[in-house]
Amino acid sequence: MVSGLTISERQRSMAVLIVLAVIGLVMAAAGANRADPMQAHGFLVLLFSLGVLCFVLNGYFEPEPSATRLTSYYDDPSKAGIVIAMLWAVFGMFIGDWVAWLLAFPDMTFDAAWSSFGRLRPAHTTGVIFGFGGNALIATSFHVMQRTSRARLPDQFSPWFVLIGYNLFCLLAVSGYFLGITQSKEYAEPEWYADIWLVIVWVTYLVLYLRTLARRKEPHIYVANWYYLAFILVVAILHVVNNLAVPASFAGAKSYSLFSGVQDAMTQWWYGHNAVAFFLTAGFLGMMYYYLPKRAGRPIYSYRMSIIGFWGITFFYMWAGSHHLHYTALPQWVQTLGMTFSVMLLVPSWIAAANALLTLNGAWDKVRDDATLRFMMMAAIFYGLSTFEGSFMAIRSVNALSHYTDWTIGHVHAGAMGWVALITFGSIYAVVPWLWKRERMYSPVLVEAHFWLALAGTLIYVFAMWNSGIIQGLMWRTYNDSGTLTYSFLDSMVAMHPYYVARAIGGLLFLIGAIVGCYNIWMTIRRPSGASALTDDALLPANLQPAE
Amino acid sequence: MDIAHHTLVAFAKSFGLFYLLAMAAVALLYACWPGNRSRFDKAARDIIEDEDKPWR
C-alpha cells in the first residue's frame, strides 16, 4: 500500500502523522495534569499515529510507483475501506447483540462500569452506523466516483487521509464511551476534540470528491454521485451545527452545548433525523443507484424518477426532524411542520424503492439465481417498508402510541438491518470480485447462507419489536375503572422479556451472517486470481446457487 | 436583534411555502424537460458498459 504512494506523498503522510502524534502527546500531558479522561485519548491518538507511522516507514524505501499507475483507477483505499467496514460490522453487531441479551438478562454487565447499558449502547450504534456504514460509504464512494467520472482519484494521499482519519474518529468515539466520555447527544456522542478532527477529515473528503468530479469525462454527473455528494455535504453541515459547544477546559474532555432547553432538543433532532436522511439514506441510495443496475446489467428504470426522488429527499428531509419531539415543549406548529414533511417524504422514498424494483422487473431470474442481487432487491423492499412505517409513525396520534416504546427500535432496525446493511452487503459482494480482479466471490453458497441469515435475523428482530412495542404502548395507556393506570412500568417490563430474547436471537443470526461474510470476503481476497480459480470452478456448480 | 415567535411563524408560513413550491417546480422541470432525455438515457446506460480505465 505504501509502495503505491510517491515519495512526496510518503513524506506528507509522515509529516501529518508526526503532527498528530505531537497533538496526542499534548492531549495526554494536559489530561494527566488534571486527571482527566482526555489523557487516555491523548495516548490513543499518540499510539495510533505512531502505529501508522511505523507502517509508512516500513515501506518508505520501496521504489516509487511507475507512471503507468495513472492509466488505471486507484482502488487501494476502497479495498482497505471494505475490509475495515466488515471488521466494524462484526464489532458493532457483537456489541449490539450483547446489549440485546443485556436487556433480557440485566446481569450481563458483569458488574463493570464500562459494560453498563449506557456505554455499550452508543458503542453499538457508533460501531454499526459510523464504523460499518461510514467506512462502507467511503470505500464505495471512492469506487463509484472514479467509475462514473471515468477519472482516477486526483492524488493518492487524500483518500488515505480520509479513510484513516475517519477511523481514528471512530476509535476515539467508541473508546470514549467505554471511558465514560460523552456529550450525551444521540448519534453525536463524541466530545469536542473528536468533533473538530472529524470536520478536518470530512472537509478533505468533500474536496477530494469535488476534485475527482472536476476531472470527469462526461458533462453530466451520474445520479449516484448526487446522492453521495448530498451525504458528504449535508453531514458536514449537520455535524458542525449540532456539535457547536464550548469546552469546559482545553485540557479536558467535557464541553457544554451552545444551545439549551428546547432549542438544544430541536437542533439535536434536526441533526438526528437528517443523519438518518443523509448518512443512512442518501449515501446508501448512491450505492444502490450504481451497484444495482451494474449487477443486474440493466440501466436504472427511470433516470428522471431518480432525479425527482433526489430533490424530494433533500428538500423534505430537512424539515422532518421535529417529529421526534411530539408532545414536548416544542411549539405545536413546529411539530405539525415536521409531521407534514414526514408524511410527504413517502413520495420521494417510494420513488427510489419503486425505481430499484422496476429496474429488476424483467430480470427476476437473475434475482432468483444471484444472492448478491437479491440482497439489493430485499434492501429496496425494506427501504419501502421502513419509509412507509416512518411516515406513519411521525403522525402525532400514532406517535402517541409508538414513542418511547420498542416500536421505534423495530422501525430503526427495519431501516438499519433491512435497508442499510442489506444494500451494503449486496454492494460489497458485487464490488469485491471487481476490485480484487476475481471471477466471483470465493463461495456463492456462503453468500446465499449470509442472505438467509440476514433476512431471518431482520424479520425475527422486527417482528419481536413490533409486538413488544405495541404491547408496551397499550399497557402504558390502559386505565382501570378508577381512572388510574392498570399496569405498572414493571409489569410492562416483565411482558417484554420473551420479545427481548427473540430480538437477541434475531440479532445473533444477523451477526453470524456478517461473520460468514467476512470469511467469504477474506477467502476471495486470498484466493489467487486466474488459473487456480478456474480449477475450483470445475468442482463447484458453474452457476450461482439457486435459492432453495 | 430579537425575532419574535410570531414573526418567524409568519415568515415560515408565507415565504417557506412559496420557495418550496418554486424549488419543486424547478426540479420537476429539469427532470422532465424533453431536451434532457437523451442525456439522462445516456447517463443511465453508460455505467453499465464502462471500459475499466480512467480517461485521464
Image: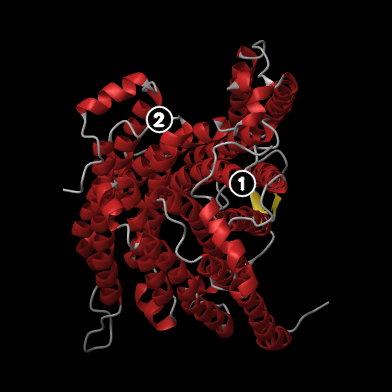
Q: Position of residue A217 (x, y in %)?
A: 67, 47
Give amino acid for label 2: Arg
Q: Is residue A36 visible?
A: no
B56 vs A187, left or right, is: right
Label 2, residues with CA under 10 Å away: few <14, some 14-19, many ≥20: some
A424 vs A334, left or right, is: left
Q: Residue at x 71, y 83 (%)?
A: B8
A322 vs A161, left or right, is: left
Determine whether A404 is above or below A330 in the image: above
Determine whether A228 is above or below A396 in the image: above
Q: Is residue B3 visible?
A: yes
Residue A379: image tag? none
Determine whether A193 is above or below A479 in the image: above
Instruction: Provide the residue designation for mark 1.
Output: A191
Q: Residue at x 29, y 47 (%)?
A: A371
Residue A438: image tag? 2
Q: How is the image coloured?
A: secondary structure
A276 vs A236, left or right, is: left
Placement of the N terminus of chain A among the 4 image quadrants:
top right
Q: Position of residue B5 (x, y in %)?
A: 70, 84
Report which quarter residue B18 is drawn in. Answer: bottom right
Q: Considering only order in the chain, which callout, 2 or 1, is on the residue closer to the N terminus?
A: 1
Q: Position of residue A357 (x, y in %)?
A: 37, 63
Give amino acid for label 1: Glu
Q: Chain of mark 1?
A: A
Q: Residue at x 64, y 11 (%)?
A: A62
Determine whether A252 is above or below A239 in the image: above
Badge 2 marks a residue whose secondary structure is: loop
Q: CA distance from mark 1 to mark 2?
A: 42 Å
